[in-house]
Amino acid sequence: MLSLIGLGIWDERDISIRGIEACKRADKLYCELYTAAWGGDLAKLEKLVGKKIQVVERSDVEDDSAKLIEEAKTKHVALLAPGDPLTATTHVHLVMECKQKKVDYEVVHASSIYTAIAKSGLQLYKFGRTATVITPAKGYASEGFYDALAENQKQGLHTLMLLDVNMGTKQAFDILFSIESAKKSSLLKEAVICSALGSENERVIYGKTSDLADIELPAPAVIIIPGKLHFLEKEFLETLDKP
């Protein structure tokens, strides 16, 4: 059996009781920390569940997923992941493999960035396609996340922009403004920037992007570009911290 268990939005205290119970039943515990930044302490989590946890890399889960599924045929294997386990496409693929190979599985859901962003005061059902700001690499610089923003703006929808695991808000704005300048566009007017949501040190700041661009909120962080605002959303935004 394979158990996909969410660690929750921030640290080891956010795993659910159901998740802890699943860990205690499992024969082998794995944990991936590459899909999102996690603010927890692995040693404390091990003490909480009473078992050792082996950290796995992206290649172990994506390239060698067959090994994980094969092990789950004869053992109860658990894979822990930051946030909710099904927010990552790779974990959805694991569910598909279990179905295809007739391996029993369970999903233990947890809090994630997709609900925590409600702290912005923006209504969740008015968000459009989520985009991830990617660090440009030599010979490759994606603009797909900006295109997603443009499409959402046309429809009056809010845009959640996830950032690379170690990316802060200043670097993300540098990338976004560089693309905007090249496209001679003007979509980046106002934003909400969030960091460490769910922790004691969380920050949620609203303002003009020109004022937010030089503020460095560290990872894990997100940028939200509002779409068409309801009057209640406008009122809530004004209660947030300002630059």
Image: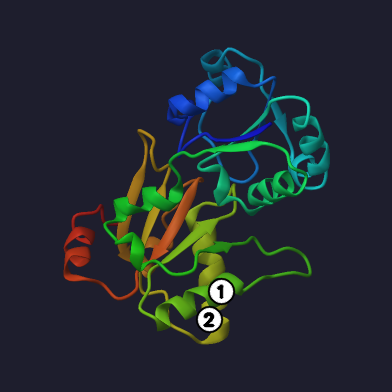
Q: Position of residue 224 (x, y in %)?
A: 40, 62
**Is residue 112 visible to the viewer in this orientation of the structure?**
yes
User: In the picture provided, is 107 more to the left or to the right than 118?
Assistant: right
Which residue was labeled with disc 2?
Answer: 181
Number of numbered discs present?
Answer: 2
Which image quadrant: the C terminus? bottom left
The structure residue drawn at horizontal position 55% and vertical position 77%, both measured from the top left corner, is: 147
Q: Residue furthest bottom?
A: 184
The structure residue drawn at horizontal position 73% and vertical position 34%, both measured from the top left corner, is: 56
Q: Is residue 222 above or below residue 138?
A: above
Are the residues tagged 1 and 2 within 8 Å (C-beta)?
Answer: yes
Q: Is residue 181 above or below residue 233?
A: below
Viewer-closest of 109 and 83: 109
Which residue was labeled with disc 1?
Answer: 178
Q: Position of residue 209 (x, y in %)?
A: 38, 68
Mark 2, Cα crowd under 10 Å, few <14 / some 14-19 / many 20+, is few
Give SS at disc 1.
helix
Amino acid identity at mark 1: Ser
Give SS at disc 2.
helix
Viewer-closest of 124 and 25: 25
CA distance for labels 1 and 2: 5 Å
Amino acid identity at mark 2: Ser
